[in-house]
């Protein structure tokens, strides 16, 4: 919890500093906050802590939290030269990236599927704004609108799936869901199967896996370069961690059901991502399709 509080407070401090036009202090304040959060993550290793049954800071959560924090640090190290050319909205950039990171830490540490939704939305809303932060740029506005519409569409799938799982078990807690499946493996509620498929579709949208990848090239092309780099690395890592925590944990007893479907998605993702990237003439679109193939490689780890 200290990690989330530190990042969220850092975002507010940076936003407050931006009100006073203290642009030179923004990057040091941001890096300091991220280093403190990283210190909390490292110092908490092997000390599994659960917060009111909603979040669990185990080694899995701490490892992926550290990866996302370090990835965000590298993104911020690129900002010095980037904002030398584009000095507008600096504080807003920094603050929204930090809020997105806050959502990612929640995504990788959820114990309750309600927190998965909360973390996902905190991250997504920040990214919708970041994609369209250049208000006078038509491509940026288009990217933001497409990302928002497709993101809202995928969230609907995810919520519908979560609702079906809740209807089958009476709980959002992933440990209780897993125990329910273990105890009733031969008499699983019919609600589980469409619920798992809908959740899989929703999360595949978020990580950019085919055939749910159509938003990715346009959004990556239209977004500012800094945000494209952020979405193609750190955001994808958090999405994969959320996927892994749910399917390798709560839904593992039903792996014979969802694994063939995921295998088909992985094969399509690898083929579409790698082959289509060869025909791109725009660097950002090539990066987008390369990112799609990376999603396939990450998801491949769940089926081997």
Image (cartoon, rainbow, N blue to C red):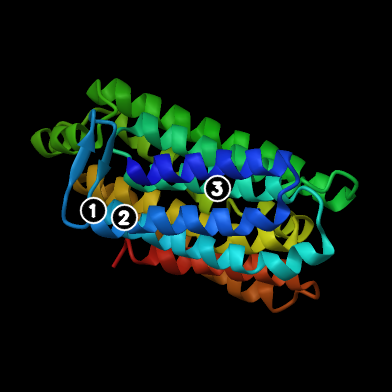
Residue at image location 61% in from the left, 37% down from the top? 125
Name the residue tied to disc 2: 41
Pointer 2 local density, CA inside 10 Å: few below 14, some 14–19, many at least 20: many
Instruction: Say left or right for 263 vs 122.
Output: left
Could you tell me how far apart the alpha carbons at marks 1 and 2 are, in whole angstroms? 5 Å
Mark 3–mark 1 distance (CA, rounded to whole Å)? 21 Å
Residue 107 visible at all: no
Chain-order first, disc 3 or disc 1: 1
For mark 2, give the secondary structure: helix
Q: Position of residue 160 (x, y in %)?
A: 45, 27
Q: Does residue 189 sit above or below 249 in this rendering?
A: above
Q: Which residue is mark 1?
A: 44
Contact flag, marks 1 and 2 (Cβ < 8 Å): yes
Tell me, for residue 90, which label it has, or none: none
Assign the N terminus to one quadrant of the image.
Answer: top left
CA separation, marks 2 and 3? Answer: 16 Å
Q: Are marks 3 and 1 in contact (CB under 8 Å)?
A: no
Observer-nearest of 146 and 2: 2
Residue position for label 3: 98
How packed is label 1: few (under 14 Cα within 10 Å), some, or many (20 or more)?
Answer: some
Q: Given contact means CB atoms under 8 Å apart, are the residues at marks 2 and 3 in contact?
A: no
Seen from this angle, which residue lies furthest bottom? 278
Q: Is residue 187 above or below residue 17?
A: above
Secondary-structure class at tag 3: helix
Asked if residue 165 lies left or right of residue 185, the reply is right
State whether residue 174 is above or below residue 29.
above
Residue 113 appears at what percent x and percent y? 35, 33
Q: Earlier in the sequence, mark 2 or mark 3?
A: 2
- Spot the residue most to the left: 183
Among the 4 quarters of the image, the one containing residue 24: bottom right
- Identity of the residue drawn at 68% across and 64% down: 79
């Amino acid at each position: 919890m200290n990690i989330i509080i530190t990042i969220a407070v850092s975002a507010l401090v940076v936003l407050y500093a931006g009100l006073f036009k203290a642009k030179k202090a923004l990057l040091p304040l941001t890096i300091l906050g991220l280093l403190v959060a990283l210190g909390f993550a490292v110092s908490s290793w092997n000390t599994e802590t659960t917060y009111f049954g909603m979040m669990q800071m185990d080694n899995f959560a701490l490892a992926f939290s550290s990866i996302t924090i370090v990835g965000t640090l590298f993104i911020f190290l690129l900002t010095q030269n980037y904002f030398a050319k584009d000095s507008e909205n600096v504080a807003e950039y920094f603050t929204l990236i930090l809020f997105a990171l806050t959502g990612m830490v929640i995504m990788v540490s959820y114990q309750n599927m309600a927190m998965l939704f909360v973390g996902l939305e905190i991250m997504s809303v920040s990214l919708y704004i970041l994609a369209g932060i250049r208000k006078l740029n038509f491509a940026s506005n288009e990217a933001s609108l497409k990302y928002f519409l497709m993101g809202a569409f995928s969230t609907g799938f995810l919520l519908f799936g979560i609702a079906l799982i809740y209807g089958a078990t009476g709980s959002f807690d992933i440990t209780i869901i897993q125990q329910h499946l273990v105890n009733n493996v031969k008499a699983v509620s019919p609600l589980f199967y469409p619920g798992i498929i809908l959740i899989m579709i929703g999360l595949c949208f978020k990580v950019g896996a085919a055939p749910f990848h159509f938003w990715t090239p346009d959004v990556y092309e239209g977004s500012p370069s800094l945000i494209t780099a952020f979405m193609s690395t750190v955001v994808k890592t958090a999405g994969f961690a959320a996927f892994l925590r749910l399917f390798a944990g709560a839904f593992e007893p039903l792996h014979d059901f969802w694994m063939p479907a995921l295998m088909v998605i992985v094969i399509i993702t690898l083929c579409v991502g790698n082959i289509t990237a060869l025909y791109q003439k725009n660097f950002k679109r090539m990066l987008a399709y390369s990112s799609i193939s990376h999603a396939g490689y990450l998801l491949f780890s769940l089926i081997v």
